[in-house]
Amino acid sequence: MSVVILDFGSQFTRLITRRFRELGAYSVILPGSASLERIQQENPQGIVLSGGPSSVYDEHAPKPAPGVLELDIPVLGVCYGMQYLAQQAGGDVQRAGKREYGKADLTEYSGDLFQGIQGEFVAWMSHSDSVTQLPKGYEVCAKTEDTPVTGIQNSQTKRYGVQFHPEVVHTPKGGQLLANFLDICGVERDWNAEHIVDELVADVQKQVGNGKVLLAISGGVDSSTLALLLAKAVGDRLTAVFIDHGLLRLGEREQVEAALRPLGVNLITVDAREQFLGELKGVDDPEQKRKIIGREFIRAFERETAQLGSFDFLAQGTLYPDVIESAGGPHSDKSGAANIKSHHNVGGLPEDLKFKLVEPFRTLFKDEVREIARLLGLPEHIRMRHPFPGPGLAIRCLGEVSEEKLDILRRVDDIFISGLREFGLYDGCSQALAVLTPIRSVGVMGDERTYSYTAALRAVTTDDFMTAEWARLPYDFLATMSNRIVNQVHEINRVVYDITGKPPATIEWE
């Protein structure tokens, strides 16, 4: 028994599945165009129509397969999904007079989906179309000041729709709304992390068979957890290789080796700094940098396997936010999701890849991986480490990458991260980073004129890395970091702090 989410291209589709799993209900994502037969294979007790970038009145707007909405099970439409429900039942959807984006307060709400919810209801909106005429049998169950039809329901047919996104953290009571939908569907709540681990191990064993696996490892929580999972699944047929691409943080190579080898991981370190920096010379476009790094990672592994022996599979700790930002979701060919940026291990892999990919975490979020890490016994200091991108400092050094700029950035980053730990702020941030900008500005140091780089600091808080808020770090702490950076890193004379959320920004600057 499950809840099936039909994906019409929303950046948040995977969050719906994640929320249901948090509530203990098994759920799966299928393409919006999945056949009725394919959907019925999942034995669904409920269906969710996701949001998406299309308008329902467009000629080629996506829609579910014939017969799906005739199933005698509850259906919840979210954003685009609600508009489709309304239109197909005889309602009207038109371009809204005023677009809603961001947080909005429901001025009224009632009905089955809002059962037991009281007080203020803040909803996250992202729409430019609205339902302007209700279909027969439906009633309005939620309103905002700018959108008189924010929620609809037909209790008799158990068809429901909300214009907002209950799955994102910016809709604080959205989880209770989704729990109410599960109650309407009668779904059992027996899904947990242990199920995920068992399923992943079985999936890896089925995919790999008797093959040998080469693991691309960075020492972060994703690849470290993957090392433990793969060891559980394939044993000594796993070899973990750490590529030092010259884009690491200060002392990181030594830290990786010291952290993983005591855990029994068969770790081989490859020095490829000259290779990577040579290929990146003269390149300032961030997409090109990511693709070059992805390509060179594979080439480095191919060279290594020539010495280590034959491998059948390459394993990577790719997470779902990486995939969806690269418009490479489970059903990207049919979802219509927009490409935000390519990730080196998603959009940057060469077409002539000599390995078969193993990516067990491709449908998981960071917090889910951390829970798996806890179950597998990964030490806490590794489990709770902030994410660090595969392209490393190359995408935090804006413009062309050079040894000089990387050296500057490493020192700035080390001061900032060490400071967060010193002041007890590290664990309160989901991710923190320093960026070396190409901006130079005039300053004065020691009664002399300077014309030096500007460094940007960024810290965010998030549950899922699909959306994020900038971390409200204390002013005194930021002042201390600024003073330390300009005093200890003489190439920097100005420090700024990024106060932009995601969206509209991404967490990384490139």
Image (tube, helix red, strand yellow):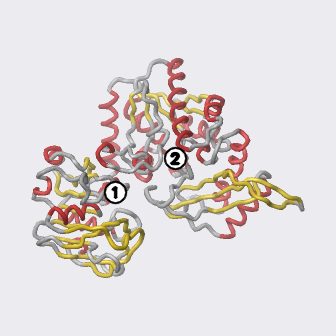
Kindly identify which residue carries mark 2. 379
**Which residue sits at x=58%, y=56%?**
432
Give left or right: position of 480 versus 425.
right
Kindly identify which residue carries mark 1. 53
Identity, as a three-letter code, of the amino acid under mark 1: Pro
In percent of width and height, residue 327 lies at 39, 46
In percent of width and height, residue 354 lies at 43, 24
Q: Secondary structure at mark 2?
A: loop
296 or 24, nearer to the observer = 296
Q: Crowding near pointer 2: few (<14 within 10 Å), some, many (20+)?
A: some
The tag on residue 152 is none
Identity, as a three-letter code, of the amino acid under mark 2: Pro
**Which residue sits at x=51%, y=58%?**
505
**Which residue sits at x=37%, y=68%?**
125
Q: Secondary structure at mark 1?
A: loop
Instruction: Give the answer, above or below, for where 360 lies relative to 154.
Output: above
In percent of width and height, residue 439 lies at 69, 54
52 or 200, nearer to the observer = 52
Of discs 1 and 2, which sits in the foreground? Answer: 1
Give left or right: position of 45 versus 17.
left
Instruction: Give the answer, above or below, for where 215 lies relative to 170.
Output: above
Give left or right: position of 332 versus 140.
right
Instruction: Give the answer, above or below, for where 477 lies relative to 25.
Output: below
Q: Crowding near pointer 1: few (<14 within 10 Å), some, many (20+)?
A: some
